[in-house]
Amino acid sequence: MSATPPAFADAREQFLAMVAGVRPELHRYCARLTGSVIEGEDVVQETLAKAFYALSLSPEVPPLRPWLFRIAHNAAIDFLKSHGTKLVEARADLEDVAGFDDKPDVTVVRAALARFVTLPLSQRSAVILKDVLGHSLEEAAETMGTSVMAVKAALVRGRAGLRQEPEEAVMTLDTRAALDRYATLFNARDWDGVRALVSDDCRLDLVSKSKRRGKQVGQYFARYEREDVALRVVALDGRLALGAYVTGAERPAYFILLEHVGERVTSIRDFRYVPYIASEAELELVTPPANDVAAPLESAKRSP
């Protein structure tokens, strides 16, 4: 694989610096549209890739925030369609609009991520933009590509939907043994043991930073050899992940996702460079097995 040209790398870094202030808000939107902080970040990455390419072809920078939200909205639609989601367009219904209240609904702001995906996309988008992110009706309509009247109708219906009692989520634990094994060796600082778990063609994605494969993945652990980070198995977005805890922290600073075949790790996605994900995540610490090796960070607190 050829190295990235310096000029391209510099331009990308300048672009990421330019959009840094908008990224956490974009993620809040995309995470609720998809019902997942991880899939939400996938959509954000796609959004930024499309925006970076579009800017390379344009002599001027458009108004950044609304432009990025429009790209993110369309990228989320493409993502949801690719996962078999049937979309319902927003429409103006005078009966619904008659019950519209311009004040944000506290129920919506506090709703769990998974609750949003129970709504049709138009309702989901409207309540996230207006109630969660505080956009105006006009801004929401621009992002969604619809009318203010249709946004009001979607808000009334979406708010009503989120007030209903949620169904209890069901989570599978298929990857528990692999995550326990990886975390135990990591926390014991047995780096040779950790590297031995990694398959020869393992893929590493340092999200928003770089990607590696094969032998280069082994170099990834060198930085962790110098840092006080402990891994704990957590339930995140209906799946199992590794939470990365620093000394004294009550919540993980970021997350790591593993894929495996048997005992060999075939993929590592490390989200340390997009820490805003952790503030949005709804997680539960999974009780460790009885033979778990004690982590070096005894002061790292468990998440409630």
Image (spheres, rainbow, N blue to C red):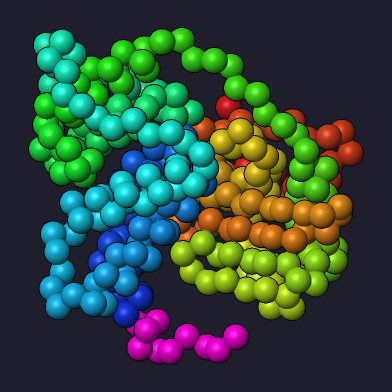
Instruction: Please tell me in which quadrant of the rendered image residue 31 appears.
Output: top left
Q: Which residues are magenta?
A: 1-10
Residue at the location (45% across, 43% down)? Answer: 81
The x and y percentages for residue 288 are: 78, 35
Decide: is 256 above or below 116: below
Q: Is residue 94 left or right of residue 120?
A: left
Residue occupying image coordinates x 64% and y 66%: 204
Q: Which residue is nearer to you in this view: 110 or 80?
A: 80
Q: Is residue 175 above or below residue 12?
A: above
Q: Is residue 68 placed above or below 33 in the rendered structure?
A: below
Whether residue 130 sits left or right of residue 35 in the image: it is left
Residue at image position (27%, 70%) is 54
Q: Quadrant of the C terminus?
A: top right
**Spot occupied by residue 136 in the image (x, y as percentages of width and height):** 13, 35
Please tell me which residue is depicted at 34% across the width and 41% down the height of the picture. 29
| Residue 208 shows up from this direction | yes
